[in-house]
Amino acid sequence: MSARKVLTWYAGGIGVLVVGFFALPAFRTVLTGAVGLVSVTAVAVGVRRYRPNRAYSWWLLGAALAVFTVGDTVYLLAANLPLGESKSTSAVVSDVFYLVMLPLIGAGLLGLTRSTTGARDRSGLLDFLIFTTVGAFLLWVLVIHPYLIGVGSTTFEQSALAAYALLDVLLLATTVRLAITSQRSVAAMLLVTGAIGNLVADLVYGAALLAGGWQPGGPTELGWLLFYASWGAAALHPSMARLTEPAAPQDSEIDKTRLVLLGLAATLAPAVLLLQVINGDVRDGAVIAVVGGVVFALVLSRLGDAVDGHRQAVARERGLRQAGAELVAAADTAEVRRAVRTAVARLVPRQFAHRIVFSINHTHGVPAATMSIWGPGVAAPSAFYPAPTSAAARRSRLLRVRTLQPALAEQLQGFETVALCPLVGDGRASGAPRVGALLVAADSRLLPTLRDSLEVLAAQAAMALERISLAQEINRRDSETYFRSLVQNAADVILIVDDDHQIRYASPSVLGVLGVEPVDCTDLAAVLHADDQLSVSTLLDPVRPEPDRRADGVDLSVRRSDGQRVQLEVTCRDLRRDRAVRGFVLTMRDVTERVRLEQELTHRAVHDTLTGLANRASYQDQVYEAVEKARDGDRTVGALSIDLDEFTAVNDTHGHAIGDALLVAAGQRLREIVSPNDLVARLGGDEFAVLVRDADGPEQVEQVADRLVQALAEPLEFGDTVVNGSVSVGVATTDDASDAGELLQRADLALYVAKGAGKGRWCRYQSELHTAIVERLELRAALTEAVEKLSFSVEYQPIVDMRTGVAVGFEALARWHHPARGPVPPEQFIGLAEETGLIEPIGDWVLRQAVGAAARWHADRGERGTPYVSINVSARQLRTPGFVATVRAALAAADVPPDRVMLEITESLLLRDEEPVWSELSELRAHGLRVAIDDFGTGFSSLSYLQQMPADVLKIDRSFTETVASSRRQRLLVEGIIRLAGTLGLDIIAEGVETEAVRTILLDMGCSSGQGYLFSRPLRDPDALRWLRGDPPPPGLPPKPRPPGD
């Protein structure tokens, strides 16, 4: 029988009994019992029919109705008894039944409420307690208490009536809360209707009883009959099962209306107290105090819950934002799974365990893994998923784990409730396809609070999966188009050939590669020249016996239809079993240009690109080969190492074009001089070599070297430019070496000696030179190591005013103490450092040390008489980019005034018109530094250059000063230099002043400053400061000089 028919029969039966109750007063007791019995039966039938999850709540309500029925029956029976002790006892008994009935109802309603909200709805419970307390308080103050004190009755009667009223209020509030949490279902509304009827009836009954005017059978009885009928009907309605299912959690946020109500509730008790104080009759002081405190505490708790709920909502929103960002960045389903799991872990509090099943559908719209999710106790998928365009398709559902498919229930074992969120696509264009499902199992109290967040997460995941699916589909289609375009536009020729060499497909590129139109490609004979058919056949034959075999990288030289030869790289794949191909696939790539480049690279690997001569690798290989052949005979092999003497100067002066032309011309002359059997090679830069393969003896090799030197001594002309092409040659033969490596090494050593002897000459290796050369090379290696470790020191030689003996400056001198050789003279390592480029790091280090010393002198002596420091700077340093910045940075770091530093440059700089160097010197002078020309008079400087040179000081070399006292000619020369300096406005410093006679002569000539052993030898930094102060010198140092005449 349908639910509608059952309710109709029930309503009809109850209606007949109620009419009979009022129409037949004599049968009221029986009819009252019948109404109660019918309602209790309705509860039992409803529980059996709809099987709610927590049936005990309904059984408690049924028991309450049964107790209420017994109480009513006892009361009506007592009403017919005469006045006396038995009637009074029966009334008490009925009151007991009534009072027992109310806790049973409360327990049943509480069970239903906990079923829908669980223990999690603390905010709803607090709202319920607040407004229930306020309602009970108002009922007490306005109704119950005034009646109790206004009539005469026993204490038990007063207590019972008060309990009825208060418990009825509690019952009504509980029922209303149940209706709210169950989203106002029909069953809940029927329960509320019955509770209202019971409350009104009890209030009217209590008032009438206290007034002494109560008579059974009046209209008040309708409230109780309504209570019976409504609660029985609620049990018979299908929605009664929903009252035991978890409902969506109520929002803990407090809106303006609820906030106003909470404020009124908190101030109601004080307001009532104020009114009673104004009226002068405070009757409920204790009740007001207790209720005010309880309500205030409940309101505070409710506000605290609102704040905590807001914090949790913000945290969930933050987690969803992070998940959204991760899902937007997800590139595949694995990243979507990972992002969803991470997001759920953020949403679920740490103290709660959880488990996730993330199912993704790949076929036909229904997730493959979720088709078997629903067990026999759950609605079918078609009922769960509404129409694709419905927003309800995205709604989640809270399910019991035990109702799921057994395998899935086992996977979620240990949890009672699971939230199932459909993964539904956007659907704006083609409906809302189901792309999967998200199942999250966790504590049943927690899942309803996460339901909305999980729905949002599921929607984001669905959109991410849909986006990935669409991207994959687009990529697939693009790939098809891409590969179709590749085949149609590929430079390689693609042919599909059957067993008879008939071409079933030819790509358009066959025209460009083989000169044949694709439409004319019917067989290989039409594509390839007749001479090449055998080659192609040999390519196909190896793959015929074994299907799916592949032949890669077969090179063929094929003649085009126009007779031109092309080089092809052919790949053959047997795809006769492939239904889409059914033939041999030939891929032909035109590698003609690549082969040409490979041949060119092979040539370049053993030849110099500029001159066309053999390169270093080829030269060394052929030297080794020639030496091995010479071991078996009495012939001599010679190796000549050749270096262009002035190549660097030519390159720097005339440019790289003339330098390259010089290299090419030198190579041509070398080839013209040597025999065809000999080898000429360019090793790199300006280095050449000649291999004399078959000489009669060392003398013949020496003759070749002599001819080379003489031939290249003649100037070379390049247009209007004439350059010097002279060479230095080092000669070594197999008579001087035991193997090829030693032969090459000794030729290089001989070249080293030839260049050191003055260039433009040749030198043959001699064993006695080996030790000196090796020693120089060892010194060079040691100097490199010393630069890396900065194993140098700086000594300072005073520059004094020869008239007073007062130091005006110090020259900073680099010193190197070799760990094995001891002190190395500067003339041995400074030139080597210039030659190797190590002078740059050495010079920079000396600059920093010297400026630091000047800073210490300045700090010790202040502004009075602080000497300057003079620092030698090489031409190589001046050509280094950023040298000016380096000097200025060193001055700034040491806080030394620029006028306390002087830079010394060699006179050789005057030989070159190097504008960049002069510009840097001018910039340094503009900054306040002074510039001195060192060793003046030893070079070949031009007076015009000297006039233009940005300098402040001339330093006369010691070679002039040391003989000025003994040579009149030398004295006149020095006097001329001093006068020239005076004319140019330059200061003079004389070097090498070692005797009083020399000092006197120089002073007479007008030279006031000098340095030399007469004043002091070079001093270490501490000794220089001590010497400057005039302190007693350490042992071995001369005292500070005295002025002339002292």
Image: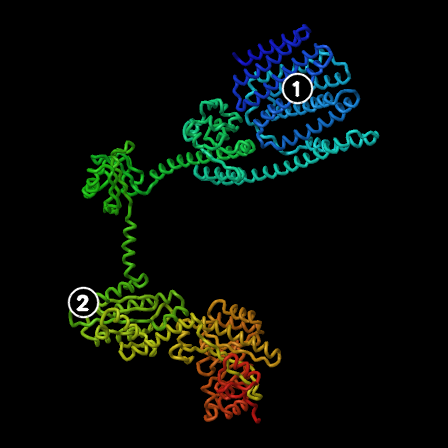
- Asked whether the viewer can see residue 623, the reply is yes
Q: How is the image coloured?
A: rainbow
Say which element carries label 2. helix
Q: Looking at the image, tell me whether mark 2 or mark 1 is earlier in sequence order.
A: 1
Q: CA distance from mark 2 to mark 1?
A: 131 Å
Name the front one of labels 2 and 1: 1
Q: Secondary structure at mark 1?
A: helix
User: Residue 271's spot in the image, x, y percent?
Assistant: 77, 32
- Look at mark 1 in the image and give the residue it sits on: 98
Q: Are marks 2 and 1 in contact (CB under 8 Å)?
A: no
Q: Type of residue at label 2?
A: Lys
Crowd class of label 2 (few under 14; some 14 to 19; many from 20; radius 10 Å): some
Q: Quadrant of the C terminus?
A: bottom right
| Image-quadrant location for residue 775 | bottom left
> From what the image shows, is residue 444 above or below residue 958?
above
Image x and y of residue 3, in percent: 54, 14
User: Residue 509's mark?
Assistant: none
Tag 2 residue: 629
Residue 365 visible in image: no
Q: Quick check: 716 above or below 27? A: below
Q: Residue furthest left?
A: 633
87 over 609 or under it: above or below: above
